[in-house]
Amino acid sequence: MKRRIIVSLLVLLILSVGVWAEGSKESVTTEELARLVFVWACFCGAALATLRGEHVRVDFLMKKIPYPTRLWVHMGISMLVASTGAIMSVSGTIYVIEKWMYPDYSTALLYPRSLFWAPVPLAGLIISGKNIFLTFHYISQITRKV
């Protein structure tokens, strides 16, 4: 799946550059499609990485912290990320609904711009849900140790 998305982005970008060099107006279409695929790939990829626990983290300092303290730090981080996901979900939903009620269409492909931003609330919901689950997991670990 990852390779397909990357290959499709590369093909769209190469087409966009090739058509632009030719001087045709069709480059707007391929550029807009590449932008749409890129936004969807970023937000869906962030949500998928969160679900799988494959997101980027720097843990060389965390390994030096004693285990009970590390659980508290992990819980705090999960709460912050859950809050960020909730903000993404609420703000993204409001924005998508506004764009849906007062339609604004893309220049070349004429799709509603709300479709462009639709993965934001979805990704926020997934990120928030996973980190709420992790927060409760760390709470159970902390109470078990006490």
Image (cartoon, rainbow, N blue to C red):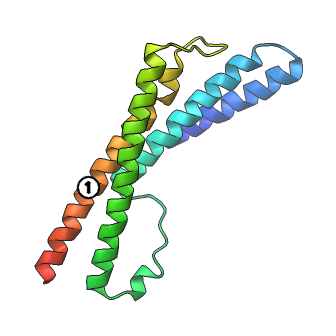
Residue 46 appears in the rendering: yes
Query: Up-down: is 92 above or below 138?
Result: above
Relative to 74, does residue 109 appear above or below in the rendering?
A: above
State which quadrant residue 24 falls in. Answer: top right
Residue 26 found in image quarter: top right
Q: Position of residue 2 (x, y in %)?
A: 50, 42
Q: Is residue 75 above or below residue 15?
A: below
Residue depicted at 50% across the width and 34% down the height:
40
Left or right, residue 103 beside residue 93: right
For the residue marked with disc 1, what is the amino acid? Ile
How many other residues sit within 10 Å of disc 1, few (<14), some (14-19) or many (≥20)? many
- Tell me if 67 is positioned left or right of 35 in this view: left
Q: Secondary structure at mark 1?
A: helix
Residue found at x 59% / y 11%? 110
Residue annotated with mark 1 = 132
Q: In the rendered image, which quarter is residue 118 located in?
A: top left
In the foreground, 82 or 65: 82
What residue do we see at 52% from left, 15% from top? 112
Q: Position of residue 16 (x, y in %)?
A: 75, 25
Which quarter of the figure is the C terminus placed in? bottom left
